[in-house]
Image (spheres, rainbow, N blue to C red):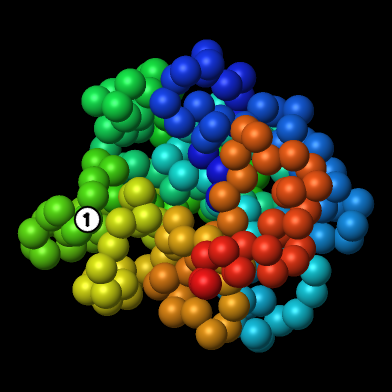
Amino acid sequence: MYHQIGEPNPKGTPFRGLTVHPDDFARQMRWMRFLGYRGLSMRDIMPYVRGERHGKVFGLTFDDGYRNVVQNAMPVLDKLGFTATNYLVANQFDGGNVWDAKIGIPFSPLMTVDEMRQWAASGHEVGSHTLDHVHLPEMTPEEARRQMVESKDVLEQALGAPVTAFCYPYGDHGPEHLVMAREAGYDNATLTKRGLASASDDPFGLPRVTVSRSTGIFRFLQKCLTRYEDKRGRG
């Protein structure tokens, strides 16, 4: 799980660790390719998660739809033949991370519609991150459902293709939101809970591995290729 791929914000900036330097990202991807692994979007990896297919693969997801992912990550992914899912906030095309302003995170631009289409045309997947990057448990059931359903509709209309992947903003969810995601027509949904996804997981509550600015290459490989994250995320 990544967020931004770019130059980290100045020291002292809240959550600056969620921005991974482009050189570090490229190194991480090259190592996985060298070891024989192929990075896949949620759309492409779900048959492996369900146990229908087998191979050396790993899932690649980006939250929020930052423009710097198109600029700095997509060329690396395309060169290596990897695919990835980017979860977009449907009401923020050509906008920014306005939900972060209150906690002091600097503004960072998000994809335009054209950039989203460019992302999809390169074989990558567009997923939904709600309309407004909301805390779903703080919403009424009706509003939570609207955020899931209408974001899917907005993205599909702009993209001209189905949107089947969902990600809960902040990882916040209750059991009822897993049901809502299924009823909204998604195929899968991801959390911020630590762990490696498997066939035993609810497809609407899939764990992920967080990669941050300070994740060195040894720790990155340990997180992705061992049970390191499962031991910490699943107890």
> Is 230 on the left-hand or right-hand side of 178?
right
> Is 12 on the left-hand or right-hand side of 211?
left
Q: What residue type is labelled 1?
A: Leu
Q: Name the residue under label 1.
A: 136
In this view, 121 is above or below 68: below
Mark 1 is surrounded, within 10 Å at the Cα level, by few (under 14), some (14 to 19) or many (20 or more) other residues, namely many
In this view, 215 is above or below 45: above
- Quarter of the image for residue 89 reads top left
Q: Which residue is drawn at 39% across and 18% down?
A: 106
Q: Does residue 29 appear in this view?
A: no
In this view, 35 is above or below 77: below
Whole-percent x, y for residue 83 in the image: 67, 52
SS label for mark 1: helix
Q: Which residue is drawn at 45% across and 31% down?
A: 15
Q: Residue at x 25, y 68 (%)?
A: 174
Q: Does residue 173 appear in this view?
A: yes
